[in-house]
Amino acid sequence: MNIFAIETSTDWCSIAFIQNEKCLSKIEKQIPRKHAEKLPEFYKSLNQKMSLDKINLDAVAISIGPGSFTGLRVGLGFAKGLAFAKGLPIVPVPTLQTIATGCDIISDEFTVLLYSH
């Protein structure tokens, strides 16, 4: 399964190409309040690197919060436009689940916290 993933709920803007649950390429940068400016550039760069236009994507995954309201709107808008243009489903992924997935879990229970100013 080929998935294009977008994460814009925090100060970090991240995109990735995932194939069969393995991240083959990603771009991520801490850019507070610049997601709308940089997300299209990140996509163009990843597209050139991975030739995404030649790959049959199966879905677009997008973080859905909690997080920055504006960041989420930027990410969701980009995901919706890309999915519509390519005829792909959108897979919503809770932000806290995304963070938890990247952690080395050492017990059965743990808590994920997201700083909110």
Image (spheres, rainbow, N blue to C red):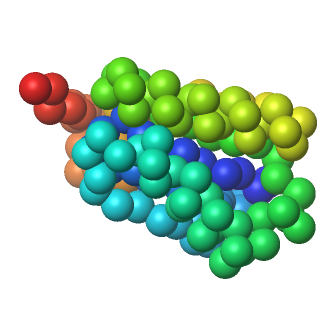
Residue at x 77% of width, y 64% of height = 52
The answer to whether residue 31 is above or below residue 10 is below
Q: Residue furthest bottom?
A: 49
Residue 113 image offset from top left, x and y in percent:
19, 31
**Looking at the image, which residue is at 46% across and 42% down?**
36
Q: Is residue 58 above or below residue 22?
A: above
Q: Quadrant of the C terminus?
A: top left
Horizontal relation, residue 93 to residue 115: left or right: right
Query: Is any atom of residue 94 visible in this view?
Result: no
Left or right of 107? Residue 83 is right
The residue that appears at 45% across and 48% down in the rendered structure is 37
Rendered position, 39 above or below 17: above
Asked whether the viewer can see residue 63, the reply is yes
Tell me what residue is drawn at x 50 percent, y 33 percent.
74
Please state, as top left, top right, bottom left or bottom right, where the N terminus lies in the image.
bottom right
Residue 25 versus residue 82: which sits nearer the camera?
82
Q: Quadrant of residue 114?
A: top left
Q: Nearer the viewer, residue 111 or 16?
A: 16
Drawn side of residue 114 relative to residue 92, left or right: left
Question: Looking at the image, how many numbered discs can be counted on the residues?
Answer: 0
Q: Tell me if residue 1 comes above or below residue 46 in the rendering.
A: above
Residue 46, percent from left and from top:
62, 68
In the image, farthest residue toward the front: 37
Q: Residue 78: where, in percent of width, then height?
A: 62, 37
Residue 34 % position (x, y): 35, 46
